[in-house]
Structure formats: C-alpha cells, structure tokens
Image: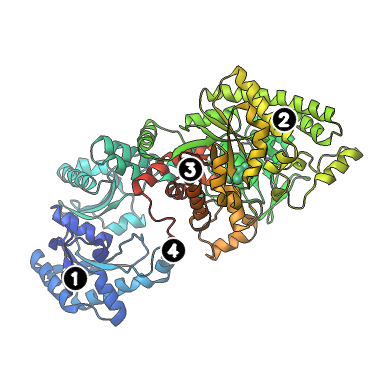
Amino acid sequence: MAESQPEARQVYGFGEGFEDRNQLGNKGANLVTMTRLGLPVPPGFVVSIDAFHRFADTGELPGSDIDRELALLESTTGRSLGNGLSVSVRSSGPVSMPGMMDTVLNVADRETLLRSIRDILGSWNVDRAIAYRDLNGISHDLGTAAVVQAMVMGNVGANSGTGVLFTRDPNTGEDELFGEYLANAQGEDIVSGTRTPEPLSWLAEQQPDVYAELYRHVKDLEAYFRDMQDIEFTVEEGTLYILQTRSGKRTGQAAVRIAVEMMREGLIRRDEALMNVTPDQVRSFLHSRIDRPERFLPVLSGLAAAPGAVSGRIVFDNADARNQAQRGPIILVRPETIPDDIQGIAAAAGVLTARGGLSSHAAIVTRAMGKPCVCGAEDADVDPVNGVLRVGDAEFKRGDVITVDGTSGHIYSGELPLISGEPTGELEELLEIADGVRRLGVWANADTPEMVALAQGFGAEGIGLLRTERQFSSPESLAAIRRFILSDTDAERTEALGDLRNLQREDFIKIFRQLDGMPVIVRLLDIPLHEFLPESMVTGDARSEHRREELAEINPMMGHRGVRLAISFPELYRMQVDAIQDAKALVDARVSVMIPQVITRQEAIEIKSHINHSGLRIGVMIETVRACMRAGRLAETVDFFSFGTNDLTQAVFSFSREDAEKEFLTTYLDKGVLEDNPFEVLDAKGVGRLMDTAVYWARRASPTIEMGVCGEHGGEPRSIAILHAVGVNYVSCSPFRVPVARLAAAQATIQGDVGLLATTA
Ligand code: PEP
Ligand code: MG
C-alpha cells in the first residue's frame, strides 16, 4: 500500500494509508495499517522521520502540518484539545528500542503538544537510547518519528479498563490468547505493578461482547502480520480500542510451535516458518536452562563455552571425578584442561576452567558431549592441590555445590532450579522442512559410539570428523603408544604397534556397529607425540626422561604433529588404517580417512604410498594457509577435502588458539577492534576469502571433489551463512549443534548469497 511520499509532506494522518516504515517508524506504520484494516484505533497522526531530520538540522517543527492534522483530529473526534480531547505523544523508530525513549501522556493544550513533540524527537539522543543503539548495533542516523494519538480512557468506571496480550502463549506457543486485564485503569497501572491484573478470561466473563470483538481483531492482526503479536488495548465505557501491535517476544519452544502451527493453519508459507525461528531459539530448545535466572546473582563469569545449565559438587581432579560421579552430578573445576582430562570431563556433568578460550580443549570436548562448560573464568583462582576454588573472598571446597550456566557464562553458588530442554514433534517437523530446503549437508563430529548415537538422533547425515586421539587415551593404549615412543628396537616398536592395532580395532568395531551404514571420516593421529609423555608422568627411568626431552618442542602445536609425524613414522598411520580394515572385515562400514595439517601434495603422495593398499577414500584437511593456496594441486591428488577452520583461523590470524582468548582477544572485542571472536564466528573477510580461493582452484582441478568443513564454525549460524556462500558441500559440527545447523543452512539457502564475501574492505 506504500505509495511514493508526496513532496515536502512531513506529517501524516493515520487514515491516509501511507505506511512507509522508514518515514513513520514501526509503531506509526502499524497504526496506519490497523486503521486501514478497519480496526478500532483511536485517531491520530505521525510526525515523520523526515521531520525529525529537519528538526535536528534547523530546530524547526513542521508547524502548519501539525496544525492541519490537529484540526482534522478535532473534527473527527468532535472534541477540541483540552475540551474533551487529550493526546499522547510517543516515539516510533524504524527499529524497536523498547522503553528507551520518552512518552508524554494527557497532553491537553496546543503549546504542550509542540513541546512534547520536540521532547520526543529529542529523546532519540538521550544517553540510554544512545547506549542501547551502541549495544545493539543500531545506526545513530536512523532517527525517530513521533506519534500523536487521541487518548482513550480505561479509568472511567467498571466498564472500562486496559490490557496487554499475546495472540499465542509466548512461553509454550499454545494457540490461546495469553494476557492480562485491569478494570478501571490506565496502561501505566499494569506496568507499574501497583495493582494485580486479572487473567483475560476474566474479561471474557465480565464483558463477553468486548472479548469476542477483541479476539476477532487480534487474530486478524496475527494473520495480517503473519506472526504472533503483542497487543495493547483499552476499553472505554464498553468500547474497545486497539492501541498498539508488534511481533511478540517468545521462548525457543514457543517460536518453533508457533511457526509450525501457523504453517499448518495455512497462515504462513514453509519458508516463512523457517525464517520465523532463530537458530538461537532452536539451540535453547535442546539444553537445560536456569528457571528465571534474573533472580540469582552469579559469583563468577567466564566464556560461555558449551551451552546448558547444570548443578553439581565440585571436584578438582580426574580420578576424583570418576569416583564421585557415581554419587551424583559433579562439576570438574580445573585451572585449564589438557587431553589427559578427558576421563574427568567424561565423568563430569559440567566443567569450569580459569583459563582457555572457546576453541580450547575443554570447550570443544564439552560442546561435543553436550555438557555445560564455562571456560576462561579469569577471576577464578583454582588450587587443585588444596582442593579450593577462590573467587575474591569467597572459597568453594571439594564437595561444595555450584551451578554452571554454559549458555550465559555465569557460575552460581549452590543448586539452582533448572528447566530441561526436550525436543518436540514440532521441532522435528520444522527441521525436516529445513532439510528439504538447504543446500549444505549437515554432518557431525563424533569420536565415540555414544556421540555417534547422539549425532544420529539429531539428524546428522554422516560423521565428518572422528578424531582418533581419544583412542590413545585408555590406560592400555596409552601404555602401548608410550612403548612405541620409548622403544629402541624395531622389534619393540612392531610389538607396540601390534597391540595398538588390536585395541583400535575393538574401538572401530563398536563405532562401525553404531554407524549402521552412515559414512564416517576418520582423521589419522594429529597431536604431537610428546603429549603422550606428559611432564606429570614420573617414570624414574632415565631413558624415558631422555626421550621426553628429545621430543619436547617450544611450540608443539606448530611442530612435529599431524602429517609431519606420519612422514617421520609412517607405521603409525599404517597401523591406524590396518585397524580400520580389520574392523571393516567384521562390520561393514563406509569409511574414509583424512590426513591433518597438510601443506603440499608431496605429503599426500608420500602418505598415500603407505596406506593406499587399504582401498579407502583418502582426503586431506585444509587447515594451513599453504594448503589453501595449493588447493588445485591437492585436489588432483586426493579424494576429498575437509576444512579445519579452527587451525586455519589460527594460521590466518597468527593468533594462538590456546591463548588468544585469555589474553588480548577479549580486549580487542571490548574495544571493538574486532567485531567477533574469529574462533567462534568465521572471519568472512580473511579466512572466508582464503577458503573461497581454495574452493575455486580445487573445483577447477577436480570439479566434483567433495569439500566439507569440520572446524567449530560448522555449527555456528552466521558462519554457516558464509560457508554456504563459499560453496562447500557440507558442514560437520558437534552433535548438539546439528539441529541448529540444519535450520541455519536452510535459512542461508532462503536468503541466498548475501554478499558476505564481497571484495570491499
Ligand atoms: C580444525 O583445526 O578445525 C579441526 C577440526 O581440527 P582440530 O580442532 O582437531 O585441530
Ligand atoms: Mg586442526
């Protein structure tokens, strides 16, 4: 209905049908729409955003336009200002800024009206509005309109009153009006909480005709705006008025149910249903959360590393974790975590660390397992030796109960009331629709049969990354790999490898059984050997000490690891591939293997010469800058690529994955030097463009080569939009992020490539 704006008009009556949100703001445009739809809206007019800008430049209001509209308002109502007519003046921006700007009520003379309009337009620049825009990334240039509207009175007797409602339940999504009504009152009386309102059913009993009319109008509004609405209304001596409508805020559960039910009712299309739910709302579905957390004060905060909330007793070491976990949920509290802690994490219900970022070991492992984790809680002084966690003056001892909220990053003392997240039929239905729309495949990262089962439950199409490090962590495997590292003779080495092969075959058999035909990509060993000989390992044996010293590196994560290790010790990868073949002989499986940390096709050729006999598909991880630049040649050499965006981000930024978040990165984010944490949200302009180059050269060399992404970014919605634009075939992420990725991938398809990789700075 929006027509081009007539020249120089700056004020518009509600009845004119001019609905341009950029001129009238949301509230103003919605009032015009409701008037056009024939709803009972008190009459009024809007001083436009154009007028705001002129006022900001010159200090002048469009006085004659306002006079004209006021005269019209007086003739429509048959009353004059101060003589039976009073008006309200409210702000109306194109982006909602709830409660940030002023409102003036009961304006009853010509002078006060102009002053109020000035005040409202001026309130665009009050401190709290500026701060709100800064926080929410809203441009300061937008400006606001001012809505002038005839007041209707809810406080003129028992037949009058005021109410607010949602057209569906904002907590559960159930299709019934949800709201409150206060007889003989004005809107402020509800907001201030001085009187307790009645449920809407009370209005239905007291004034059934009014309720029936209200029901009809609000359902019309819901159908018109194609979304659940949050509506304010007033009854003046038995006559209903609708004062405001806007899309209602809602929980994740409600968002999904409302979208699916409105689609089933034919009120919205399938793509609209998908766009009406945010990935965050799906995420909140699957994790337990604290019931009304605003009631509690956190004792400590860190990075929200793995979502969900859990309460448990504190333990400080792995052995204790395993013992205590049998007696109820425990929280593993560590200064930081190392691969050895895997057993403790597996036993724990939640994890808290003082150091480490969002791609630290603790974060990745807990996210994959679906356990709440807060890491990098810098104010925590963790003393595992004495079994104390100190936060300022407070002390928590082994056995004390805390609550970890990995969604917000807060830690609370004691056990808090939790609400558990249960997937529903509606979520399944929404995600199945998403599956029919999305172009990106969604796979999962999983290392154990349990994680594979989780991934299957969440709808993953395959396992895109099975990290084999875990297979070296059982006491038997650890002993065997240590014998391999420490051995002096070929015979000793061969025997140790034989033991490892048998142990790993057993692991693979269990995993393949669980896969039940689902494809899996097994990543061959990546970590440096010396991690198997930690300093805490006291052998008292001179040879071991010597070997550990030999293997020690100053910068091990950029040292003798991944493919480099296998170039030196090809028998390690051969052993892993043989174990896979042994298992496959018993349980058929669709297995590919991939080589980490590759920089050149010569590495791939060399490794292939040792493992080609297996007949398995062999791919490389693309996680070094050089591999991206040599993607064409690599694509000629291997069967598939998987981008390791964790290491690739580290390499592109020259930021240490392990340390950046605990040091300068937080400062960078606080000061706005970087907008997002690149280990969380894929950096489109650097990493994304490098990937784009790699994909281009790889497809030129091998048009059908399969390319996936198995870094943490594969489960993050904004990154998924970038990866969709880059044109990879699939993303692979922690099992718990699979539902989020399915929705985000569909939304990326609906929105199309939105210039995320544009070549401008
Ligand atoms: C990566 O680097 O993105 C990756 C998936 O491997 P890892 O996190 O195990 O280094
Ligand atoms: Mg990596």
Q: Is ligand 1 less than 8 Å from the beta carbon at label 1? A: no
Q: Residue 656: where, in percent of width, then height?
A: 65, 54
Mark closer to the chain start, 1 or 4: 1
Residue located 58% across and 50% down the image: 648
**Circle 4 residue:** 760
Q: Nearer the viewer, mark 1 or mark 4?
A: 4
Q: Which residue is mark 2?
A: 474
User: Which residue is labeled 1 in the image?
Assistant: 11
Q: Earlier in the sequence, mark 3 or mark 2?
A: 3
> Marks 1/2: CA distance?
75 Å
Nearer the observer: mark 1 or 3; the answer is 1
Mark 1–mark 2 CB contact (< 8 Å): no
Mark 4 vs 3: CB contact within 8 A: no
The quadrant of the image that shows the N terminus is: bottom left
Kindly report which numbered mark, 3 or 2, lies closer to the viewer in this rendering: 2
Q: Is residue 614 visible?
A: yes
Nearer to us: label 1 or label 2: 2
Coloring applied to the structure: rainbow
What amino acid type should be assigned to the residue bearing mark 2?
A: Ser
Side of 78 relative to 622 (left or right):
left
Q: Amino acid at mark 3?
A: Asp
Q: Based on the displayed image, in which of its 4 quarters is residue 43 positioned?
A: bottom left
Q: Which residue is mark 3?
A: 291
Q: Earlier in the sequence, mark 4 or mark 2?
A: 2
Please name the residue shown 32% across and 54% down the image.
190
Label 2 element class: loop
Q: In the shown orientation, is residue 541 left or right of residue 269? A: right
